[in-house]
Image: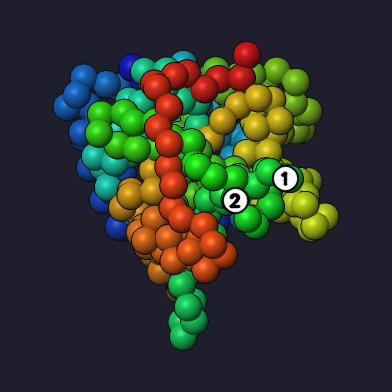
Amino acid sequence: MRAAFASPVADKVEPLFVKSLTETLGLLHARGHEADWRFVSSSVLHESRNTLARDQLRSGADILVQADADQTFDAECLVNAIECVAAGHADVLGFPITVRRPGAKEKFASPALIDEADPGYVGRPRLPFRAFRYEGVRYVEVAHVSGIVVFSRRCVEQLSADAERAEDGSPILWDFGGRNAQGARVGEDMYFSQRWRAAGGRIFCNFAAKVGHVGKFSFGSDYAGWLTPRLEAIGLRFDVRDDPPHADAAE
């Protein structure tokens, strides 16, 4: 299995990110996989992601990983996700991201829970959450993920086939053209997620993954612990139903 890592870099590559990346690449190599890393330095984030995806496909990689260069992550968690996608159990896997502004309460920026009315709307979620397990890790279905995401090659190839092209020939898979249920524009990650789900694909998240962030925002990872009391406040409980192992590609 060959994994291609890529990072859009708007400012600088953080040393703690390099540490996480080096540990992950080392673990992949130790397990007999091939892996490399590339980056594009640009302040235009969505264009960087599109260019990187094009180059990742050209590299012949089976698995594509895009990770922001200011994040930290646990090598075991990320390698489990990569091997899960490589085994065909899912096409898009991600991790929860919490944001804590100085002096403010913790707020989760991703993932969005799936709502009956609109996949981009974070409201009263559809329960029970759908999930599956791979090598002891539970992946729960969500509406979108961002920050650190693992993609199958077939997912990116499928969306690339019908995508508009940028001036450099890159398929436009990430953009700021998406809108949520209220009509507001959404970020490039949600745009990608909306396109994949519209194509019949599914997105899953490891709620227990250890993910961090370097900078003025601090990120955490106890998503289930954060979510449970908030569901109870609207009369719901954290309820997850595991499906049998399955492939989640859009046909």
Say what amino acid the circle numbered 2 marks.
Pro
* Residue behind mark 1: 118
* Residue behind mark 2: 125
Q: Quadrant of residue 173?
A: top right
- Residue furthest out toward the right: 183
Name the foreground residue: 184 vs 158. 184
Q: Which residue is depicted at the point 46% across and 55% down?
A: 237
Secondary structure of residue under mark 2: loop
Q: Which residue is depicted at the point 63% across and 39% down?
A: 193
Residue 200 as seen in the image, left or right of residue 228: right
Q: Which residue is depicted at the point 52% across and 57% down?
A: 236
Name the foreground residue: 83 vs 245. 245
Q: Which residue is depicted at the point 52% across and 68% down?
A: 233
Name the foreground residue: 159 vs 232. 232
Q: Which quarter of the figure is the C terminus placed in?
A: top right
Q: Are marks 2 and 1 in contact (CB under 8 Å)?
A: no
Q: CA distance from mark 2 to mark 1?
A: 10 Å
Name the foreground residue: 22 vs 193. 193
Q: Position of residue 49 (x, y in %)?
A: 59, 40
- Residue furthest out toward the left: 30
Q: Position of residue 235 (x, y in %)?
A: 54, 62
- Residue furthest out toward the bottom: 103
